[in-house]
Image (tube, rainbow, N blue to C red):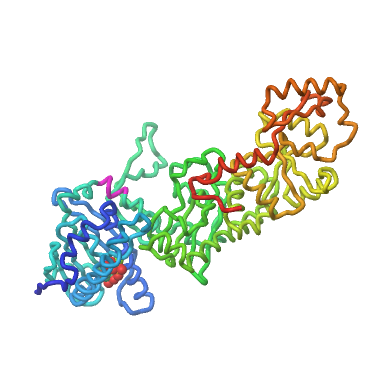
Amino acid sequence: MSSGKINVSVENIFPLIKKFLYSDHEIFLRELISNATDATLKLKHLTSIGEAAVEYGNPKIEVKIDKEGKKLHIIDQGLGMTMEEVEKYINQIAFSGAEEFLEKYKDSAKDSGVIGHFGLGFYSAFMVASKVELITKSFKDEPAAHWTCDGSPEFTLVPHDKTERGTEIILHIAEDSLEFLEESKIKGLLTKYNKFMPIPIKFGTKQEALPKPEDAPEDYKTEYKEVENIINNPNPAWTKQPTDLKDEDYKSFYRELYPMQFDDPLFHIHLNVDYPFNLTGILYFPKLAADLQIQKDKIQLYQNQVFVTDNVDGIVPEFLTMLKGVIDSPDIPLNVSRSYLQADGNVKKISNYITRKVSDKLKSLFNENREDFEAKWNDIKIVLEYGMLSEPKFYEKAGDFVLYPTIDNTYFTLAELKEKLKDTQTDKDGKLVILYASNKETQHSYIESAKEKGYEVLLLDSPIVSHLIQKLEADNENLTFARVDGDVIEKLIQKEENQISKLSEDEKESLKTVLETIVPKETYSVQLEAMDSKSAPFMITQPEFMRRMKEMSQSGGGGMFGMGNLPEM
Ligand code: ADP
Ligand code: MG
């Protein structure tokens, strides 16, 4: 029997732990279940290399609420600890680990940029418990140990009669944390943090229907039996090899991730790399067109199947944060601020890797089934267009698959478009003029008039189009975009006979004078050359340049998804 005092240098570490990250008290459960998982996986390893002469079996982790006793139990069948090991790992290492963690992060933790909170470990139990007991029996042939600590630096360590291998942690829940004795609360936490951890986690029992017997009578009532309630899927899809998964498996994993999502994803990208960093995961392109703003199902970040956060800013390129899915990497530093994260070399590589995988996937989808790709265009265009603007590495590849649809739903790549228009749609300087509409309804008569003249008109209707065409023009010297209702259409080389107006010069003059009293001359100009058109007796156009200036100043700045500023152009 022994008791002692933990060697403290931070005077009152326990009150500090309690105060630490007030809103994040709940992470204690993740930490304790991570420890239980580690202990189980360590035993698995030891038995596999013959260093532990015990049966590994089918171990699980159990979480149990004792409401009356105000206790929460976390029980594992892992490798356990001897008395000496408790002294070493719990009193010394875990303690100094917690101490070091606090020293380092007690200031930055207040900074909302801190993204995960790994590191506090075992002692995070004191965020919710007034007293913690640890009863543990090592796989080695040694007596079990019983460690108790009430939150002061004093502890007791005595032998215990536990005979089954493994560790049981008993949290005596503090009066201000009684919510952690609610079944729904614990269930919610287990689902949030532990849904895909690699060891089965049991939490209570559930009713399972028995199969209907062959000779069941007419009025047979389904019978149930009580079975263990395992809350996690220890083998989630992203940990498997892509070759072992069918399209349906990816879809059902999507539903497992987001039970409230009813739309199937458009396609997925399986990430799997182990050099120069380790990363696995599955990203999904959701149907975006319908719910651009609804973004509560986000990409989730895991480390070794433990949920860390769904704030992946700085890790996933900004334009891909609208995707859904999971990424799992032990190589992403946690407990760091966003600015640190963005400066981290590994993180930069990870972000580039994701960009490359996404562009490769888009390219292969485009090449393998262009028709299908075109059908999905409306749902994916916003992500791709934003990517072209914000991610130079993506822009480089985008020419291979980014599409420009016409008003009549024919899809061109930029290269195809250039080829198609090179003889028919140029201005007097020989520059290619790409006509586009941004709204099918309001620009209807301009569209019709341009079509009558034999021009192709694109439909570019995403909110960032003015930025995109600005960029395309900057990068393609011989190219200019003109909206159908802009003045540039006049500059196109047109077939002369189409231009003959049925009005005399005098008539034109007086009509023009009348019209110009209605539309401000400074911002619009009146064209009577379109008089012959069936759809438009005359045209009022706005100089392309002025309209663009106005649009850019409206859509710039805030960023279209509240995702910060658009790049300088
Ligand atoms: P970390 O998990 O980062 O090592 P913790 O503070 O969470 O830090 O735990 C400290 C140590 O205590 C672990 O490394 C492990 O040796 C020991 N430990 C904690 N929980 C268990 C457990 N359930 N079974 C066996 N050992 C444990
Ligand atoms: Mg730990």
From what the image shows, is residue 551 above or below residue 187?
Answer: above
Q: Is residue 212 visible?
A: yes
From what the image shows, is residue 45 above or below residue 24?
Answer: below
Residue at x 16%, y 64% (from the top left corner): 12
x%, y% of residue 346?
Answer: 48, 68
x%, y% of residue 21?
Answer: 27, 56
Residue at x 78%, y 30% (from the top left corner): 449
From what the image shows, is residue 428 above or below residue 97?
Answer: above
x%, y% of residue 257?
Answer: 44, 49
Q: Where on the picture, by quarter, is residue 153? A: bottom left
Q: Left or right: 323 with respect to 493? A: left
- In this view, which residue lies farthest toward the right? 497
Q: Say if the magenta span includes residue 229.
A: no
Q: Nearer the viewer, residue 478 or 67?
A: 478
Identify the main secondary structure in magenta. Answer: helix
From what the image shows, is residue 456 above or below residue 403?
Answer: above
Q: Is residue 78 visible?
A: no
Q: Nearer the viewer, residue 403 or 569?
A: 569
Q: Nearer the viewer, residue 188 or 5?
A: 5
Q: Give the magenta part as a residue range.
A: 183-188
Quadrant of the rendered image holding ligand 1: bottom left
x%, y% of residue 550?
Answer: 60, 39
Instruction: Report how many numbered discs are placed on residues in the image.
Output: 0
Q: Left or right: 36 with respect to 235? A: left
Q: Where on the picture, by quarter, is residue 374? A: top right
